[in-house]
Image (cartoon, helix red, strand yellow):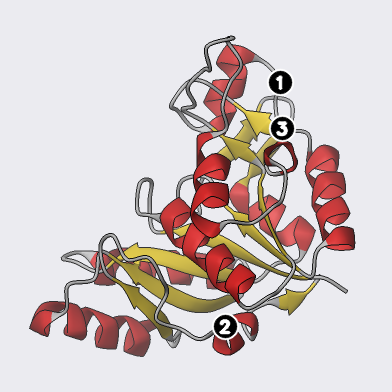
Amino acid sequence: MSRGIFVTGTGTDIGKTYITGLILKKLREAGLSAAYFKAAVSGNERSADGALIAGDPLHVKTVSGIEQPLEEMCPYVYENAVSPHLAARIEGSPVEPDVIKSRFADLCSRYDFVTMEGSGGIICPIRWDGQKILLEDIIKALGLDCIIVADAGLGTINSVVLTCEYMKNRSIAVKGIIFNNWQGGIMEEDNRSMCQQLTGVPVIACVERGAADLDISADELIKLYGGV
């Protein structure tokens, strides 16, 4: 049985893709069979031949060094840098839940560890037409526990606690918090302590800006992955 985890964040541009790349790199370096998956990615550029390039999956693949083909990583790729539901309204091709489930199941059948990255923060509309799908609906449908990525700096206590409380109220398990852009010092150390005390969720890693590795062992990391 494959093991999976979902990576969400306290907001957009918080560093989810960067951290996810380091997670996959850690698994690969431990000799584990690991794959990446994202339901939908917006704000992508086009190649010289006009094809859309899935930017987040490409970054993860480049940083992690995994051999998984890029075309397996994300079924819905949009050009407009807006929420997936709005990008689909502009460009067409709205997210189909059955496609997400089948593509994810296929990866689980061929890889031992599957790391799925979300779009934006936890309250992200994935589709909003005849069907109304939020990011949380996909997490629940796939039966995944979560890791939250947050900025280490000022304001993170509020954003982390609100995100954790929302997820708990939706019966989504949060296994750990990863602080990005970590610089240390009294404020950030206090942020780490307060977030843990107020949420009951451990801060499992603190990642400095530009770091090439996670300060967590592969053994500790894989304990976060649940059976899928």
Going from N to C along the chain, the mark reached first, 3 or 2, is 3
Residue closest to the eye, 202 or 200: 202
Q: Quadrant of residue 57?
A: top right
Q: Is residue 221 above or below residue 98?
A: below
On the image, numbered disc 2 is attached to which residue? 218
Q: Give the structural element (helix, strand or loop) at label 2.
A: helix
Residue closest to the eye, 202 or 208: 208
Residue 87 located left or right of residue 179: right
- Counting other residues with Cα less than 10 Å from the Cα at mark 3, is it few (<14), some (14-19), or many (20 or more)? many
Q: Nearer the viewer, mark 3 or mark 2?
A: 2
> Is there CB contact under 8 Å for labels 1 and 2?
no
User: Which quadrant is home to the N terminus?
Assistant: bottom right
Task: Work out whether 16 lies above or below 102.
Answer: below
In this rendering, does residue 192 appear at all? yes
Farthest left residue in view: 186
Residue at image position (19%, 66%) is 153
**Residue 171 seen from this side:** no
Which three-letter amino acid code belongs to the residue tagged 3? Val
Instruction: Specify the amino acid type for callout 2.
Output: Ala
Give 5 or 94, whichever is nearer the viewer.
5
210 lies left or right of 87: left
| 3D distance between C-alphas at marks 1 and 2 | 37 Å
Residue 95 numbered mark, or none: 3
Q: Residue at x 58, y 64 (%)?
A: 24
- Classify the position of the C terminus by image quarter: bottom right
How many discs appear? 3
N-term-proximal mark, 1 vs 2: 1
Residue drawn at (64%, 56%), measured in percent from left and top? 66
Disc number at residue 110? none
Q: CA distance from mark 3 to mark 1?
A: 7 Å
Q: Could you tell me residue 114's position as x and y percent?
A: 71, 63
Residue placed under numbered mark 1 in the picture: 93
